[in-house]
Image: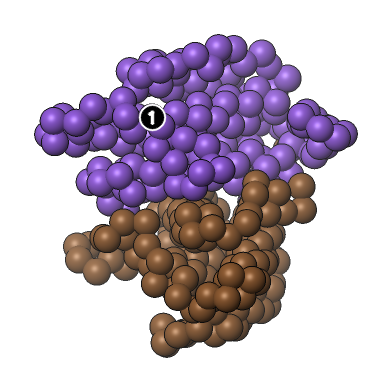
Chain colours: A purple, B brown
């Protein structure tokens, strides 16, 4: 017995993007309770040369949309990377979820041997089979940005716990 | 076509545990270059109520070992959680890798419908199919602790980049 490419990808992205959305809601509530500006969190970083929360959320969305689109040779929605508010990030998460849900299951299934090419800013593009791409590039990269967003919120005092991370469990 | 439970789990754990080991080596080199005590990093936290680096590494190892053992009803090695040095954490990572490598591939494959029970400190145990456990509990939990360890090191000045996280790509 085996598992399908769809069940190893789409439900994972949807669960974690849904969680990310709830963390941002909690971040707004936390800031408002402290009479602080929630949008100030967008610039929060864990290190001067790490990306801020704004970019972590943008890239988490992109990791998920490309994580599906590249498996099906689909056209993912383009985002202009011009969000300046948490509300705009919520819209981006919503648009990402809507795109992922729109991809037919049977197009994702069967993609494990497909050649996937990932462009890089410098150097030759990376090439994977669909399965290698999913398990060794798309999912680790997605979890990197999701977890870093969570860590940034926790570092800035937002009340989150492991059950918020593993929601639904 | 589909992917196997082994290929969706064991190589992922081995790659990321190998990366974690290299990050800790870089942490030692970073501290020594600054004439600082590398072991001071073990107590580093991102928030007062988050676990320190020592525990993040311990739990990353446990997430991986249980992530395999529970699929095969195997007996994972027991660790006493008494590490006090980065060198001892490296030994734990090594023992975890050795255990994971020792589990026969054909025992992991075919575990996707197996009933997996995860005890909790309070409340009823969680129950999953093998596939649900792997994709919605074991891997997210593993990536949580791996990425938090990375974030802690970056937050404390250790020179790491995305290529260290996605090593081998």
Location of mark 1 (residue): A42
Instruction: Report the side of B141 relative to B120 (left or right).
Output: right
To which quarter of the image does residue A40 belong? Answer: top left
Report x, y in % for residue B160.
63, 54
The crowd level at tag 1 (other Cα within 10 Å; few <14, some 14-19, many 20+) is many
Along the viewing direction, whichever of B54 and B9 lies nearer the viewer:
B54
User: Visible in this render: residue A98?
Assistant: no
Specify whether residue A155 is in view.
yes
Q: Which residue is at the front of the view, A139 or A27? A: A27
The residue sitting at the right extreme is A124
Vertical side of B59 occupied by A47: above or below: above
Q: In the shown orientation, is residue A56 left or right of residue A126?
A: left
Residue drawn at point x = 36 percent, y = 19 percent: A85
Name the one closer to the observer, A132 or B158. B158
Mark 1 residue element: helix
Is A126 left or right of B100, judged from the image as shown?
right
* Front-lying residue, B12 or A108: B12
Q: Position of residue B154 (x, y in %)?
A: 53, 55
Q: Chain of mark 1?
A: A
Seen at 42% across and 87% down, the residue is: B82
Q: Quadrant of residue A7?
A: top right
């Amino acid at each position: 017995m085996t598992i399908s490419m769809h069940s190893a990808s789409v439900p994972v992205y949807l669960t974690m993007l849904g969680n990310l959305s709830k963390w941002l809601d909690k971040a707004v509530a936390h800031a408002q309770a402290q009479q602080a500006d929630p949008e100030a969190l967008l610039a929060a970083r864990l290190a001067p040369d790490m990306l801020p929360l704004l970019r972590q959320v943008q890239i988490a969305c992109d990791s998920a949309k490309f994580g599906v689109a590249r498996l099906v040779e689909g056209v993912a929605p383009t985002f202009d990377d011009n969000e300046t508010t948490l509300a705009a990030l919520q819209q981006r998460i919503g648009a990402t979820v809507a795109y992922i849900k729109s991809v037919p299951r049977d197009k994702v299934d069967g993609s494990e041997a497909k050649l996937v090419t990932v462009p890089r800013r410098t150097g030759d593009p990376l090439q994977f089979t669909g399965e290698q791409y999913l398990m060794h590039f798309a999912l680790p990269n997605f979890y990197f940005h999701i977890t870093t967003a969570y860590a940034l919120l926790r570092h800035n005092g937002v009340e989150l716990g492991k059950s918020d991370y593993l929601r639904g469990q």
